[in-house]
Image (cartoon, rainbow, N blue to C red):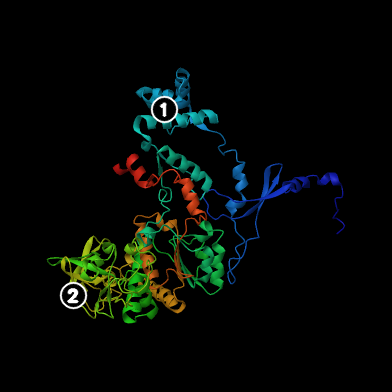
């Protein structure tokens, strides 16, 4: 080893100082990265002379509850390199304005003492207005000062309000996920000005319309730590490692805790490598897969074997037992609206009877009105808006009948559209005839309609499929193959595992869904097909169960106080809100295409 010689000359090692200095800092501050990410990860920012030198994940998160893994580490590669963006030469640090507009403005401003008059001169002159508008999309930006930029903005807004009215102004504010304060600043200004603020969640197709369609709320989903409580996780359209990076460890830890992780994804995504089972469904065809799953669940767990947990759950927490009017028009029958309590003599005097609904009660053998409908929410007698199986009139216990099949008065052939084939099928549905103020009406239950819609054979006549192998009948495992590329046996196995786990665990199955599904046409159907499976298996409202839509994790703690500030509710109500997609669809002439 005589040929090795140690260098002990300090001057020969000065290059090391570069690396030492790289990590020097004079203080550490706590921060997060609010750039359209709702992870809200806590970061320790090491600062030297006011400059960020490096960042490190915080490790002092409180434990949520015993039995759940700790939150840290929380963070992602995007977060730890965020300071590169802060100091990037490409970052816009000053107002930029198109040169042709800037020159036109300065010329007009020199001739007018009032900035609003200067803007009016530009807008009312067809030539000057055309000159800056045709320059759009062609670059030519120049730097200007904040005073000049703000004056142009204010003048243009006041000109528009003076000539057309303030409601002709529409604005968009940085979304709350980036900064609640920044969003509130813009939205409050627009509300006080009299303008409309455009929606954001749906504008870029992140908002899942199936949530308000089904539950009447936006996306009130579980805290990601609850994934650990699940025993069957299905990830569909959500690449957890990439889009839920700070929380992905909960899914991995749940898997090592005995949970089965199934991924529906056309590609072998980052989260697919963690899956126990990867099912490569064709892009945009998740709905067909889930509808076939629902078909199997209804057939095997609701007809062949009536699973007690599932039956009781649907009676208590779903609209499955509610009565629906079957509209008869000759030989053509279609499902109509809910039968309203106010249509029956027993409930004719009930407050908000048009907004209260009926079930068929096994105990009395008659229609009854359980508590918990929207009419109960808004009646003068408060405190009775609870999902209780009691007659709101006399508090008598109710045992809702899910299906009228055993006690039916008749069987009607109801027409169901099959949009997948641009056709329709007619299937027998059991009905009972009820005397109402409008005459005798045929009614059935939501549950009976659901069975017919999904083509689950159980006795009624009509165009029901022969078995799972009937590829021409909508919603069978064989039918979905041409859409998804997935074999029928895979669907059957998945459905049995999903429902079997829910039965054994009391509903601890969850579906993690993200914008990957939501950006497809008819995305609400993708969601609702999986929501149906969760409801049929009693998973909604259960720790470790339910639908969890994650574009971000929008948990705005000071929601009520913040909304009052952001929407200027201390000055006027209701706020002026405008649906963003519809606005752009109309005003950018997208309807032409």
Residue 256: image location, x then y, percent: 56, 72
Do we see residue 340 in this rendering?
Answer: no
Q: Which mark is residue 517?
A: none
Q: Which residue is mark 2?
A: 411
Figure check: 463 above or below 175: below
Numbered disc 1: secondary structure? helix
Eye-nearest disc, 1 or 2: 2
Side of 359 relative to 230 (left or right): left
Camera-side residue of 117 and 487: 117
The residue that appears at 35% across and 29% down in the rendered structure is: 163
Q: Which residue is mark 1?
A: 132
Camera-side residue of 542 and 525: 542
Residue 512: image location, x then y, percent: 46, 63
Residue 7: image location, x then y, percent: 85, 50
Quarter of the image for the N terminus: give it: bottom right
Q: Crowdedness of circle 1 by 10 Å Cα count: few (<14), some, many (20+)?
A: some
Quarter of the image for the C terminus: give it: top left
Do we see residue 565 in this rendering?
Answer: yes
Numbered disc 2: secondary structure? strand
Q: Quadrant of residue 514?
A: bottom left
Choose the circle earlier in sequence order: 1 or 2.
1
Q: Quadrant of residue 427?
A: bottom left
Residue 97: image location, x then y, percent: 49, 30
Side of 20 relative to 453 (left or right): right
Camera-side residue of 477 and 351: 351
């Amino acid at each position: 080893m005589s040929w090795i010689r140690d260098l002990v000359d300090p001057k020969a090692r000065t290059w090391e100082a570069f690396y030492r200095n790289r990590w020097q800092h004079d203080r550490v501050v706590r921060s997060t990265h609010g750039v359209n990410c709702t992870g809200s990860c806590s970061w320790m920012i090491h600062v030297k002379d006011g400059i960020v030198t490096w960042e490190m994940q915080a490790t002092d998160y409180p434990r949520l509850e015993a039995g759940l893994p700790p939150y840290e580490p929380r963070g992602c590669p995007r977060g730890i390199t965020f300071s590169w963006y802060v100091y990037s030469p490409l970052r816009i640090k000053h107002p930029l304005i198109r040169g042709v507009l800037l020159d036109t403005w300065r010329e007009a401003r020199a001739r007018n003492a009032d900035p609003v008059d200067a803007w009016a001169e530009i807008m009312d002159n067809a030539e000057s207005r055309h000159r800056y508008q045709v320059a759009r999309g062609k670059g030519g930006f120049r730097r200007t000062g904040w005073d000049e930029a703000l004056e142009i903005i204010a003048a243009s807004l006041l000109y528009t309000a003076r000539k057309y009215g303030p409601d002709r102004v529409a604005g968009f504010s940085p979304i709350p996920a980036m900064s609640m304060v920044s969003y509130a600043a813009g939205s409050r200004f627009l509300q006080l000005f009299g303008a409309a603020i455009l929606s954001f969640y749906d504008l870029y197709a992140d908002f899942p319309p199936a949530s308000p369609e089904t539950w009447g709320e936006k996306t009130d989903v579980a805290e990601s730590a609850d994934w650990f409580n699940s025993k069957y996780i299905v990830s569909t359209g959500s690449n957890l490692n990439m889009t839920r990076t700070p929380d992905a460890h909960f899914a991995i830890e749940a898997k090592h805790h005995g949970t089965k992780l199934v991924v529906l994804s056309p590609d072998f995504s980052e989260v697919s490598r963690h899956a126990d089972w990867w099912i490569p469904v064709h892009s945009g065809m998740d709905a067909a897969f889930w509808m076939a799953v629902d078909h199997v669940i209804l057939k095997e767990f609701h007809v062949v074997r009536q699973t007690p947990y599932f039956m009781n759950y649907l009676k208590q927490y779903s609209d499955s037992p509610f009565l629906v009017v079957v509209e008869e028009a000759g030989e053509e029958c279609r499902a109509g609206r809910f039968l309203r309590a106010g249509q029956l003599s027993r409930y004719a005097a009930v407050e908000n009877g048009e907004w209260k609904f009926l079930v068929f009660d096994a105990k009395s053998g008659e229609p009854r009105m359980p508590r918990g409908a929207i009419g109960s929410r808004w009646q003068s007698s408060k405190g009775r808006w609870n999902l209780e199986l009691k007659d709101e009139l006399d508090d008598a216990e109710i045992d809702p009948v899910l299906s009228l099949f055993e006690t039916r008065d008749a069987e009607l052939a109801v027409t169901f559209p099959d949009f997948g084939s641009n056709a329709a099928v007619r299937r027998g549905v059991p009905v009972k005839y009820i005397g109402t103020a409008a005459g005798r009406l045929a009614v059935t239950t939501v549950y009976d309609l659901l069975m017919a819609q999904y083509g689950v054979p159980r006795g009624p006549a009509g165009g029901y499929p022969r078995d799972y192998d009937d590829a021409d009948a909508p919603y069978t495992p064989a039918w979905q193959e041409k859409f998804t590329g997935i074999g029928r046996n895979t669907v059957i196995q998945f459905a049995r595992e999903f429902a079997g786990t829910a039965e054994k665990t009391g509903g601890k199955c969850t579906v993690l869904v993200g914008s990957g599904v939501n950006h497809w046409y008819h995305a609400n159907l993708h969601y609702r097909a999986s929501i149906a499976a969760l409801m049929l298996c009693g998973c909604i409202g259960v720790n470790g169960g339910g639908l969890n839509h994650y574009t971000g994790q929008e948990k705005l703690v000071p929601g009520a106080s913040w909304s009052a500030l952001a929407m200027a509710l201390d000055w006027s109500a209701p706020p002026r809100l405008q649906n963003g997609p519809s606005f752009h669809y109309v005003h950018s002439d997208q309807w032409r295409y």
